[in-house]
Amino acid sequence: MHDLGSMVMTADDLLIRKAEKADADEVFALAREFGLTFRPEREAFDAALPQLLANDDALLLVAVVNGRVQGYLLGFVHLTLFANGPVAWVEEAMVQSGSRRQGIGRTLLEEFERWARTREAGYVAMATRRAPEFYHALGYEASATFFRKVLR
């Protein structure tokens, strides 16, 4: 079983690890860059972060380059009826704009896939219109149309 309790080194200057409370400021800055429809608010972020870190069905990864958080990925595993068990869902994946095309996003996603396999997920999915070439290169395929209704 792949243990994320230990840090995962992927390159000389890139470290992928589980997020910690101390990463809050840097992750919040990235979340604000990620949000297009919603504008993340610090109070809501600070309330959600400890809950996500404590949730066994959630994984919040950070990509640290030279001591600074340059990206993050938030994903979940949940049970389904149609897929004969759990599936994994990437809710947010963000790499700082000046740090893209350096393998950070790929490494975050690969680490999430490893975690999802340990949770016996049947597949990994996400809803995004950004960077389709990136996801295709990693073996992802377009599968469905995404609908949403904003409730607040």
Image: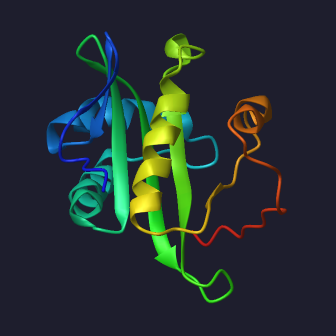
Can residue 95 be seen by looking at this rendering? no
Residue sticking out furthest to the front: 1
- Most extreme residue toward the bottom is 81
How many marks the image carries: the answer is: 0
Residue at point 71% right, 70% down? 149
Inspect this view and state whether residue 78 appears: yes
Instruction: Using residue 61 as the reference point, say whether residue 144 is left or right of it.
Output: right
| 131 with respect to 24 (left or right) | right
Q: Residue at x 30, y 29 (%)?
A: 26
| Residue 85, image x, y percentages | 55, 82
Q: Is residue 105 left or right of residue 1?
A: right
Screen quadrant of the C terminus: bottom right
Asked if residue 135 is positioned above or below residue 56 in the image, the reply reads above
- Position of residue 145 relative to residue 136, above or below, is below
Between 59 and 151, the one nearer to me in the picture: 59
Vertical placement of residue 14 versus 71, above or below: above
Residue 86 position, x and y percent, is 52, 76
Residue at 56% across, 17% down: 100
What residue do we see at 43% from left, 42% from top? Answer: 111
Give the left or right position of residue 70, taking residue 26 as reference.
right
Coloration mode = rainbow
Q: Position of residue 92 (x, y in %)?
A: 52, 47
Q: On the rendered image, what quadrant is the N terminus found in?
A: bottom left
Residue at the limit of the structure toward the left, as seen here: 22
Would you place residue 104 above or below residue 127 in this image? above
Q: Position of residue 80 (x, y in %)?
A: 58, 83
* Foreground pick, 99 / 2: 2
- The quadrant in which residue 119 appears is bottom left
